[in-house]
Image: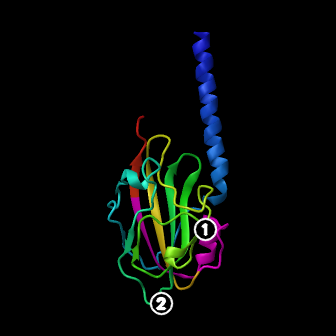
Amino acid sequence: MKRKTKWIVIALVLILLIVAAVFFLNKRGSTDITVASSIPRIAVTSSAFDDMGTIPDQYTGRGADISPDLTLSELAEGAVSVAIIMDDLDVPFAGNYTHWVVWNIPATTQIPEGIPHGETVPSLDGAIQGMAYGQNRYKGPLPPFGTHRYQFHVFVLDSMVNLDGSADKAALRKAVEGHILQYGTLTGWYPRQAN
């Protein structure tokens, strides 16, 4: 019985250490996103999944791990660029965990799926992917437990953003302040799957 108790204690300590590590690694980039209610909202949809629907495997760490397509309902006059932040909203004790940041997408209502990895995206006229999940790329859902919500925040801007690929979510949020013409979200669910 003592041996079993010992292994339970070791397992609990390991779980606490993992949770603490996630918290501290994520703390730097976990700026919660709030946008003034005076900013006009834009509808964001995807052919991959409905708002509050389940994200298909191909857009997750269990599949091809490619970004889904996004469609914006209508761009405001004066729109110059689009920026996107994707967060996991359900990481315990760590706030929102950022999976993707991309900006300087030329103003468009159609953002294709499968944005290539890398700091600069030539297929999007030099759009920039910043640091999220420690990489310059989209990193799809792969929750370690439970079912998590993943939210795509879309900002339509009146300018380009003067940041390089070393910037993170917090830097992007600061840079877009005062330049947001429209804002919208798309949220999907993804469960942990048993092996």
User: Is residue 185 within the magenta segment?
Assistant: yes
Q: Name the foreground residue: 38 vs 158.
A: 158
Residue 25 at what x, y percent from top left? 66, 50
- Amino acid type at circle 1 is Glu
Identify the residue at the far bottom of this view.
78
C-alpha span from label 1 to label 2 = 26 Å
Q: In the drawing, does residue 85 fall left or right of residue 46? A: right
Residue lying at 48% horizontally and 45% vertically, measured from the top left: 143
Q: Quadrant of the N terminus?
A: top right
Q: Which secondary structure lies at badge 2? A: loop
Q: Nearer the viewer, mark 1 or mark 2?
A: 1
Task: Of the two numbered discs 1 and 2 on the same chain, state the one appearing first in sequence.
Answer: 2
Residue 123 at what x, y percent from top left? 49, 74
User: Which numbered disc covers residue 119?
Assistant: 1
Does residue 101 sit above or below 123 in this rendering?
above
Q: How many marks?
A: 2
Does residue 18 sit above or below 42 in this rendering?
above
Identify the residue at the far top of this view.
1
Residue lying at 45% horizontally and 56% vertically, measured from the top left: 150
Q: Residues within 10 Å of mark 2 (few under 14, many from 20)?
A: few
Q: In the drawing, does residue 4 fall left or right of residue 56? A: right
Does residue 128 sit above or below 31 in this rendering?
below
- The segment highlighted magenta reads 161-187
